[in-house]
Image (cartoon, helix red, strand yellow):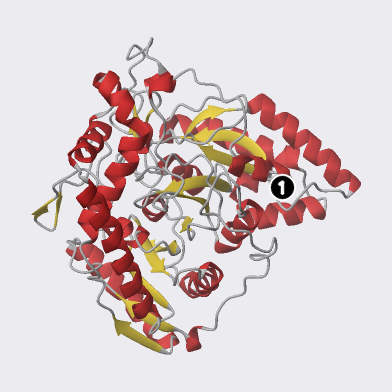
Amino acid sequence: MSEASLPELSAVEMLRGFAQRHFTPDDVLAACLDRISRWNPTINALTTIDTEGASQQAQASTRRWAKGQPLGRLDGVPIGIKDMQDVRGLPTTHGSPLFRNNLAARDQAIVARLRNSGAVVAAKTNVPEFGAGGNTRNPVWGATCNPFDTRLIVGGSSGGSAAALAADMLPLCTGSDTGGSLRLPASLCGVVGFRPSANVIAHPDRPLGWSAISVLGPMARTMDDLVLMLGCIHGSDLDDPLSAPAAADRFNNIRPTPLARLRVGVSEDFGGLPVDPEIRATFRQRIDLIAPHVASLTEVDLALGDMDRVFDILRAESFLAAFGIGVQRSSDDFPSQVRANVAVGRKMTLDDRAWAHAEQTRILRRFNRLMLEVDVILLPTAPVSPFPWTQSFADTIDGQPQDIYYRWLALTYRGSLSGGPSLTLPAGRDASGMPFGLQMLGAIGGDARLLAIGKSLETLFQQDNSTARPRPDFAALKPAPVDPRSIIDSARHADADPTSARTAV
């Protein structure tokens, strides 16, 4: 195998190669860094690249493999960390000038677990400013371009992670998800993203510890890689009251579910949301492919309650907790999206909050009854094909104006309200030739079951070129006509106080 092709290997294949001494972690990291140097200037997926630190980690891993003593299940695998999660000694900027020079003093819990598994932390991945919105661009690092077409968005807020995976810069990356922050970019970049149940991956840095709206999750190119990574990062933490102790090997033996036994629920629009007609058509084609292989396929009604208003209130509540004081002190330090969420939160009353939590409970119980009839619910992940990254958000979908910058994410954020697991699986391309992601909703606590179903559908999709995971054509890829770094503002808030803000996710 040539060194140039090493970054294209899955994490599972890399580990097999280490064990069989076909190549070393040093070899893999060098190949990944070479690929990063070639393509990151065009795609802008990675922010801080820790060449020196990663090289030291890879050298130590190579020595361990030479002795036959790998540290853990990811020993030597390069990984990217979302730039809202702390990596000791590296900047955590949140895409904000407020945190431009913010060096993390410690590893966040998810990063510590990855290190304990032997993963080589190679780089941080780009995000929207403070993670607000579905377009990965900010005034510190600029915009991240889609590896399939550099003029277009990658989604957000885990957009840098998704783009780095799609471009074969790194085999694994971290993400986080409030309203679709890892599912949307995974869909638009043709990779896998998993939002676990709220109790699976400890999130001790969540500002509202008792709110399940924001979770951490793994991102990868294949289901096997995603499950491998999940097995290393799940677990509880006393500072996260929602996390729950579980068997350390709970995700070690996820096997595909026989499709012939599967009861599938289907919804094109999550209870009447606007969806572009071409996306609907692509989704129907995927369902037609699946239908002959499963036990049953049933249209389900996902109009479970006033989901949009519930999400508006819960999101505003979390943003108010994270950014309220900072916006009050100096609103100009924060992007319009954050100010808008804080403004919504300040208009809320205790009646609003009580109603939202009660309505979310009703939504959960309706969803539970629905899941008694099916094993999984399938729907699109994104309502539109990727649009230019110079456009902040999708302001109109199928002729319907969107009333706030995140409304176009409703296909994913409505799924967040149940607290159950959801998965985005690459399923070929849409009518515009861009990646299409199939979203899967599982029962509360049914994470392992959903992952098993995901493995089965991945195998089915891989049997046909039209539905297999798409790959960018790098021979044809050109730099974006607008430099993605042209939006960097090196002067903005250079003297601002970062202690006035906390990240919401």
Residue designated by label 1: 117
| Mark 1 burial class by Cα count in 10 Å: few <14, some 14-19, many 20+ | many
249 vs 149, left or right, is: right
Q: Is residue 367 above or below residue 56?
A: below
Residue 134 in view in this figure: no
The quadrant of the image that shows the C terminus is top left
Q: Residue at x 40, y 83 (%)?
A: 372
Q: Nearer the viewer, residue 359 or 488?
A: 359
Q: Is residue 235 above or below residue 66?
A: below
Q: Nearer the viewer, residue 299 or 33?
A: 299
Query: What element does badge 1 sit on?
Result: loop
Most distant residue in the front direction: 350
147 vs 115, left or right, is: left
x then y, percent, for residue 142: 36, 27
Residue 203 in view in this figure: yes
295 vs 338, left or right, is: right
